[in-house]
């Protein structure tokens, strides 16, 4: 017979990972089919992308159809694995005292998939519906949005909201063009600068893009993603969990 204290310890231990386990189950069921940008990628990864040297960055092409229109895009991705995202979610739930809540893990997993399918765009284009990219409500036309280091940006090529098909050459050029402006939300957590500060971030990123002329936000996002993929600790996701704590505590 298993001693009572050993059985009790096993129950307590299992409770501390309920959030991560629930996240893993949800991601396993939903993540792969949601990753629309990685359906057609080059066989050989890019391992010398600046700032990501030695990483398996994938060059991918994909198409999005909406409102009877189709655009094809080019993007460079460094997507984390299911297991890595689950570990990051488990850590974020733990930071807000909800590691033993399956609802916390499931809700954060659904949040990540709903926001960006767990894609981390290193550079290139994410095609979105115009209304989802900040355009007029009800306008579902597909448009190009430039990305760098997991953040929407405006490059020197200024191709945001382009609604005509771009050439591969134009997209390759924009993926390497100097950054002119950053935007708000950081993938994969969909975190903003306030989330970063609330989670203990100290870098001078300003409160909004206009207060970040050196684009320090991009460096913060890149470093956070690389650390999160290496260790499972995602400071930006922890900040989001802090903001959503009430909702996460009620999730089932």
Image (cartoon, helix red, strand yellow):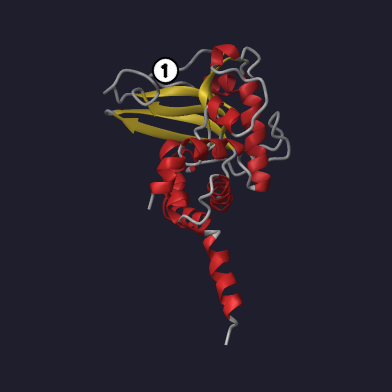
Q: Residue at x 64, y 30 (%)?
A: 201
Inspect this view and state whether residue 156 appears: no
Q: Which residue is mark 1?
A: 161
Q: Is residue 245 rendered to the left or right of residue 94?
A: left
Which residue appears at 51% of the width and 23% of the height? 184
Left or right: where 179 falls relative to 243: right
Residue 12 versus residue 156: which sits nearer the camera? Answer: 12
Please give the name of the residue rendered at 56% of the width and 25% of the height, measured from the top-left corner: 193
Q: Nearer the viewer, residue 235 or 45?
A: 235
SS at badge 1: loop
Please state if 74 lies on the left or on the right of 6 as rendered.
Answer: left
As drawn, 154 above or below 147: above
Q: Nearer the viewer, residue 16 or 224?
A: 16
Q: Is residue 188 left or right of residue 222?
A: left
Residue 151 image position (x, y, % from top left): 54, 26
Alpha-carbon neighbours of circle 1 within 10 Å: few (<14), some, or many (≥20)? some
Residue found at x 32% / y 24%: 141
State the image quarter where residue 173 is shown: top right
Q: Position of residue 198 (x, y in %)?
A: 57, 31
Tell me if I can see residue 136 in this picture.
yes
- Which quadrant holds residue 209? top right
The N terminus is located in which quarter?
bottom right
The answer to which image quadrant residue 136 occupies is top left
Residue 250 higher or lower than 3, as above or below: above
Coordinates of residue 241 in the picture (x, y in percent):
50, 40
Measuring from the top left, give residue 9's x and y in whole percent: 59, 70
């Amino acid at each position: 017979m298993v001693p009572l204290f050993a059985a009790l310890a096993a129950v307590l231990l299992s409770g501390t990972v309920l959030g991560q386990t629930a996240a893993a189950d949800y991601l396993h069921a939903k993540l792969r089919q949601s990753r629309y940008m990685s359906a057609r990628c080059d066989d050989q990864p890019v391992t010398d992308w600046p700032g990501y040297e030695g990483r398996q960055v994938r060059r991918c092409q994909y198409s999005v159809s909406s409102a009877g229109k189709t655009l094809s895009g080019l993007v460079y991705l460094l997507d984390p694995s299911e297991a890595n995202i689950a570990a990051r979610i488990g850590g974020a739930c733990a930071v807000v005292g909800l590691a033993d809540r399956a609802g916390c893990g499931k809700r954060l997993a659904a949040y990540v998939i709903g926001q960006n399918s767990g894609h981390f765009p290193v550079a290139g284009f994410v095609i979105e519906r115009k209304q989802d990219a900040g355009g007029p409500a009800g306008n579902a036309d597909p448009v190009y949005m430039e990305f760098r280091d997991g953040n929407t940006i405006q490059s020197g090529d200024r191709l945001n909201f382009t609604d005509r098909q771009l050439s591969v050459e134009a997209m390759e050029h924009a993926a390497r063009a100097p950054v002119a402006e950053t935007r708000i939300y950081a993938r994969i957590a969909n975190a903003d600068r306030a989330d970063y500060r609330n989670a203990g971030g100290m870098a001078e990123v300003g409160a909004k893009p206009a207060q970040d002329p050196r684009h320090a936000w991009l460096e913060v996002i890149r470093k956070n993603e690389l650390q999160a993929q290496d260790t499972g600790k995602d400071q930006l996701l922890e900040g989001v969990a802090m903001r959503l704590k009430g909702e996460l505590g009620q999730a089932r």
